[in-house]
Amino acid sequence: MTVESSAARKPRRSAAGKAGTTGSKTGTTAGTAGATGAKRTTRSTAKKSTDPELVQLLTPEGKRVENAVYDSYVAGITPEDLRGLYRDMVLTRRFDAEATALQRQGELGLWASLLGQEAAQIGSGRATREDDYVFPTYREHGVAWCRGVDPTNLLGMFRGVNNGGWDPNSNNFHLYTIVIGSQTLHATGYAMGVAKDGADSAVVAYFGDGASSQGDVAESFTFAAVYNAPVVFFCQNNQWAISEPTERQTRVPLYQRAQGYGFPGVRVDGNDVLACLAVTKWALERARNGEGPTLVEAFTYRMGAHTTSDDPTRYRGDEERLAWEAKDPILRLRRYLEASNHADEGFFAELESESEALGKRVREAVRAMPDPDHFAIFENAYADGHALVDEERAQFAAYQASFADEGGH
């Protein structure tokens, strides 16, 4: 599907310099010491002086901490905004749990859960503007929620009844990408087009730690840096590329790879929705100001399986998972809301009811999805049609007809 440029026709401001010459010091700015995630059970849990710094605004205990660089990006956040972020995470988690249950019941062929990554997705998703464009992988259910995509539309592809489920240009949210890492090239090319249009919108490309090993990602970094593209590369490092841990892929923290391409990188606590919001706003601001790309590594954890076809108990232990459950992004924000008197029991009870209603709507919507036309697979393969596709369509029609008997069965 061709994605039309929907960038606002607003003149871009002049670049503040070549890629990587502006804001590079931010990638090494300390958030709060000692905030790195729990190490795997097979490694030492001792804090090393060489461990990378982590931007954090909200501790796992729900305490607000100051950060000289990023506080200004959430300075105007209100109690209502905080409740909105909490609601987004809760409803996204409920939708995700419902989809997992539907797959177990045979209603979906597969599902990729985001359990544990809600803060990274909601924080970064809420940082985008309407005219920004987002290129997801297949796990960005929370970002889709922020972009206004109906959650039931995410399920058609996993049920096998459509090829995507929504018009990318309606929400500036591209279709889910199954090919690992390819969306980073799509995002970079689109961002280069945005720059040529003279617009001040930005592009966000989501990918995982596993995708960071793909050549497509390296190529997108090169093009984005050389052409000073207004793109934010948002890597959700959930520690495991299916069954491969991050240390099997890199000798340095992922965010530091940006240095070799000449643009800044920063590691943020991916379970801290406020920090993810602030850092993504900063990176998007750089892009809109003509300062080029940024790599954001959201250091988080996949608490569930890679997909419903995966068994994580075969390659990681319960101790590791329990350590990360203590850093749960939803529980963290709830503690802060309660300690700050920004939410009462009535709010949480009402949200629970809304969550139940969402689950019911998702179940009913999936089971009501009509089967696709058997010949739909041949549509939209080529914009102007193709003789070979016509031939294959005719062959398939003959094959289908061969099952009919005289009684019409």
Image (cartoon, grey):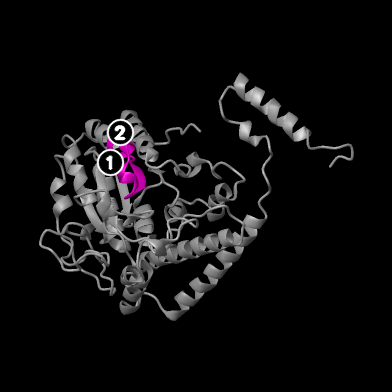
Residue at x-position 78% and y-position 33%: 401
Q: Residue furthest left?
A: 49
- Against 169, residue 120 (above or below) is below
Q: Nearer the viewer, residue 70 or 10?
A: 70
Q: Which residue is mark 1?
A: 288
Amino acid type of disc 1?
Arg
Does 208 lie within the magenta span? yes
**Viewer can see residue 67:** yes
Q: Which residues are magenta?
A: 199-219
Q: Nearer the viewer, residue 61 or 240?
A: 240
In the picture, measured across the screen, residue 256 lies left or right of residue 342, that is: left
Q: Position of residue 97 (x, y in %)?
A: 50, 64
Please report whichever mark, 1 or 2, sits nearer to the chain's N-terminal start.
Answer: 2
* Picture quadrant where residue 288 is located: top left
Q: Position of residue 130 (x, y in %)?
A: 41, 46
- Against 19, residue 329 (above or below) is below
Amino acid type of disc 2?
Pro
Q: Nearer the viewer, mark 1 or mark 2?
A: 1
Circles 1, 2 touching at the beta carbon (< 8 Å)? no
Does 47 lie within the magenta span? no
Name the mark on residue 260. none
Name the mark on residue 11. 2
